[in-house]
Amino acid sequence: MLRAAARLAESLARRSDPAAAIDRIAAVAERLASLLAAGLAPAAAWGNVRLDDPETTGRRLRWADRTVSAGDRAVLTAAAAAAADGADVAAGVEEAMRDQPSASPAWSVLAAAWAVAEAAGSPLALCLTVLAGALRDEAQLRREARAALAGPAASSRLVAALPLIALGFGAVLGFDTAGVLFGNPVGIACLLAGSALLWAGARWNAALIARAAVARPAPGLELELLAVAMSSGASLDRAQQIVGAALRRHLSEIDGTRAAAPVLALAERAGAPVADLLRAEAARLRGTARAEGAMRAAALGVRLMIPLGCCVLPAFVLLGVAPLLISVVTGTLGGAA
């Protein structure tokens, strides 16, 4: 029983980890890179890849494997089928993702990298290795953001529960707060208004927390892909066309390769290797995203005070204090009569 409970807790923890799916796709990219570097054809490499949790082995692996979504399995199967048929693997991944809403968005990153490598003639193993590193960095970034937001998020949930705690506390003291809320016209009005304020406060808190979380996929990815495309010997214009087409097709939320313009200008002035500068700039962007995430988490603690004052505290008065006072007054008047 205890072992089953521990496994259940572990499974729930992994399900709630926003970076677990990204880590799994990174593991797929790493395994594909290793198989391709060993001389296997893409069809054979895809056919030998399994989608599981790379951090577990043996008996734990079978349990953790249950946390893999059906959408991710379907995308992997579609990619392997496309590779076996000699079709466009990136297109197969994208088509499967449209049919599988539960699939991880990180598949689009893998599809974009695969499309760039094939169009530019770059070594697939090198491209997938670079992609895996970028995905690992993104997973770590999301975990750090989640850890930084955990405190403010827990505080907001605790404060949102105050009206319900006050309602129960009044009942424990012997006051008919529930009867007032459901049987007294004034109490019913307090119940409706307080519930509406609680709902609004919860939605407001959720919106603030979501805004503070990481949203942009793989910061600096477009620079990494541009460096990979240029490593094949393609000209700068050709590399930009390839990466731009891949991003428009698979990662439309990334605004092309505009972030590369300052780096390309610097490389032209200094005569430095463009690919190295692009990778350094990508690393800088990931560091900047990590710092910005920490700043958003720090600011969130202050911003959560706004829904607290505007929604939660009035709801506390309406659901906790007002029914208690009404119960006292009605009890006193009834006793006097």
Image (cartoon, rainbow, N blue to C red):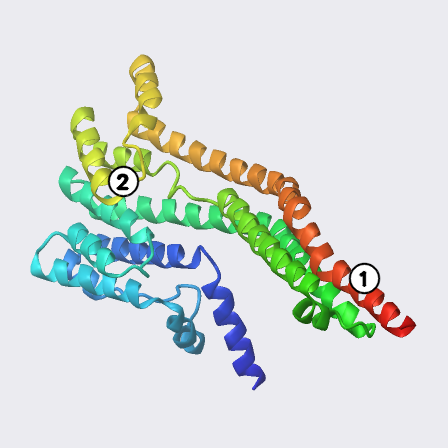
Picture residue at 59% right of the left edge, 51% below the top: 201
Above or below 27: residue 245 = above
Q: In the rendering, at what x and y percent does residue 273 appear? A: 30, 24
Above or below 302: residue 102 = below
Residue at the limit of the structure toward the top, as seen here: 269
* Mark-to-mark CA distance, 2 and 1: 57 Å
Residue at the limit of the structure toward the bottom, as seen here: 1
- Label for residue 252? 2
The residue type indicated by label 2 comes to Ser
Q: Which badge, 2 or 1, is on the more N-terminal residue? A: 2
- Label for residue 325? 1
Picture residue at 34% right of the left edge, 66% below the top: 69
Q: Is residue 166 left or right of residue 65?
A: right
Residue 16, can we see it? yes
Q: In the rendering, at what x and y percent does residue 132 appear? A: 34, 49
Above or below 308: residue 245 = above
- Label for residue 177? none
Classify the position of the N terminus by image quarter. bottom right
**Along the line of sight, the residue nearer the viewer: 200 or 337:** 337
